[in-house]
Image (spheres, grey):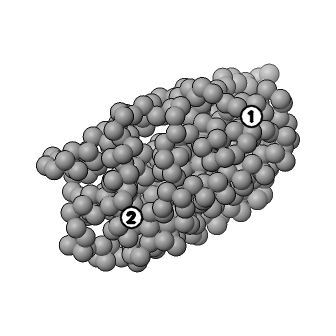
């Protein structure tokens, strides 16, 4: 029984697997640098449950401050908590399109990290405002304003998700990853700024750890883009210019304040948002001032600009921050594909 069976006329070839499909399996490595980043990501994993949560004492804050912190994390969750689902989908797509193995693994590691970032939102909120973001009954005007604003934020988060789902299969890695790169640039900038500004040891440690993850995500995006950008056509270049403007419009909600062009918000939203952000700032969360946020965002954009212009991609005009460039007017939800 040690001999195998060889049919007369030879083996029958298995049918080809229709593509896109995750099969046949293979583990091709083309970019050693990505494989190295993935190895590093496994060694740097941290556990949000091990942060010093006992230092976060609800009694150390006023009710308004606790509401403000909950509100900020609810805004953050609009971005960071979409990360696991966004990257899980991108991971599946990378398998189906047979991207090289380290690309798939890096997407997976970002999914893993974003799950931790989401957990930080979850734990911070449940400790300070049980039932938050939305499963609680507001009693004061301020609380009603917070609850209502969060509802509107998540309405827009839902539009982003619908658009992302329609977009993710349509765009090449170059387009997707320029948007992702902008999101990671925004995220690393945000957490670096807040890690330095917060007076609270728990938030300081949390923001440092998240910021370190976001810098690694940025490195992953850059490494993928170095492979993808050399083959760009002019069509794709102008699509990327649009996407960069879309990224600015979308991400400004957490980095700064929401500009016109995508966000569907009631007219009172922004004023109430500012009042709530003031309470979060007052609580020592590390929320930068309006001007500091604008300056940080401007610096982050300048970095993105230098990177994309090297590849002949024009930067969009950002008049909100006095940045000159190509005018991009209408933003479709399907243009909004960046992720933290
Ligand atoms: Fe990220
Ligand atoms: Fe994140």
Residue 13 falls left or right of residue 81: right
Residue 170, relative to residue 180: is it above or below?
A: above
| CB under 8 Å between discs 2 and 1 | no
Q: Earlier in the sequence, mark 2 or mark 1?
A: 2
What secondary structure is marked by label 1?
A: loop
**Marks 2 and 1, how far apart at CA:** 35 Å
Q: Nearer the viewer, residue 15 or 267?
A: 267
Q: Residue at x 46, y 34 (%)?
A: 263
Q: Residue 281 carries which label?
A: 2
Residue 146, relative to residue 197: is it above or below?
A: above
Q: Which of 41 and 52 is in front in this view?
A: 52
Q: Residue 184 carries which label?
A: none
Name the spot of residue 256 as percent of width and height, x first. Answer: 51, 51
Name the spot of residue 304 as percent of width and height, x first. Answer: 71, 50
What secondary structure is marked by label 2?
A: helix
Residue 172 visible at all: no
Name the spot of residue 75 as percent of width and height, x first. Answer: 40, 49
Q: Which residue is drawn at 53% across and 46% down?
A: 252
CA neighbours of label 2 inside 10 A, class few (<14), some (14 to 19), many (20+):
many
Q: In which quarter of the image is residue 55?
A: bottom left
Q: Which residue is drawn at 74% across and 34% down?
A: 326
Q: Residue at x 16, y 50 (%)?
A: 140
CA neighbours of label 1 inside 10 A, class few (<14), some (14 to 19), many (20+):
some
Quadrant where the N terminus sits is top right
Circle 1 is placed at which residue position? 326
Name the spot of residue 71 as percent of width and height, x first. Answer: 33, 53
């Amino acid at each position: 029984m040690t001999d195998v069976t060889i049919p007369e006329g030879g083996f029958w070839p298995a049918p080809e697997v229709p593509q896109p499909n995750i099969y046949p399996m293979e583990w091709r490595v083309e970019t050693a640098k990505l494989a190295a980043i993935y190895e590093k990501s496994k060694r740097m994993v941290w556990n949000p449950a091990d942060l010093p949560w006992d230092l976060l004492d609800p009694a150390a804050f006023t009710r308004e401050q606790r509401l403000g912190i909950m509100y900020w994390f609810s805004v953050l969750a609009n971005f960071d908590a979409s990360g696991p689902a966004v990257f899980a989908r991108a991971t599946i797509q990378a398998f189906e399109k047979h991207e090289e193995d380290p690309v798939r693994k890096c997407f997976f590691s970002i999914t893993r990290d974003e799950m931790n970032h989401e957990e930080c939102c979850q734990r911070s909120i449940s400790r300070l405002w049980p039932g938050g973001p939305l499963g609680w009954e507001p009693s004061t005007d301020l609380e009603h304003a917070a609850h209502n604003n969060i509802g509107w934020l998540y309405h827009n988060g839902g539009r982003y998700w619908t658009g992302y789902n329609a977009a993710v299969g349509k765009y090449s890695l170059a387009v997707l990853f320029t948007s992702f790169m902008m999101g990671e640039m925004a995220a690393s900038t945000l957490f670096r700024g807040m890690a330095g500004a917060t007076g609270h040891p728990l938030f300081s440690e949390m923001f440092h750890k998240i910021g370190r993850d976001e810098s690694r995500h940025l490195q992953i995006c850059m490494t993928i883009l170095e492979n993808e950008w050399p083959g760009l056509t002019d069509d794709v270049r102008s699509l990327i210019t649009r996407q960069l403007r879309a990224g600015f419009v979308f991400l400004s909600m957490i980095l700064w304040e929401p500009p016109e062009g995508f966000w569907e918000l009631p007219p009172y939203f922004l004023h109430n948002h500012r009042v709530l952000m003031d309470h979060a700032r007052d609580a020592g969360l590390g929320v930068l001032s309006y001007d500091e946020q604008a300056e940080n965002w401007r610096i982050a954009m300048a970095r993105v600009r230098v990177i994309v212009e090297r590849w002949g991609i024009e930067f969009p005009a950002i008049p909100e921050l006095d940045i000159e460039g190509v005018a991009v007017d209408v933003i479709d939800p399907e243009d909004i594909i960046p992720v933290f």
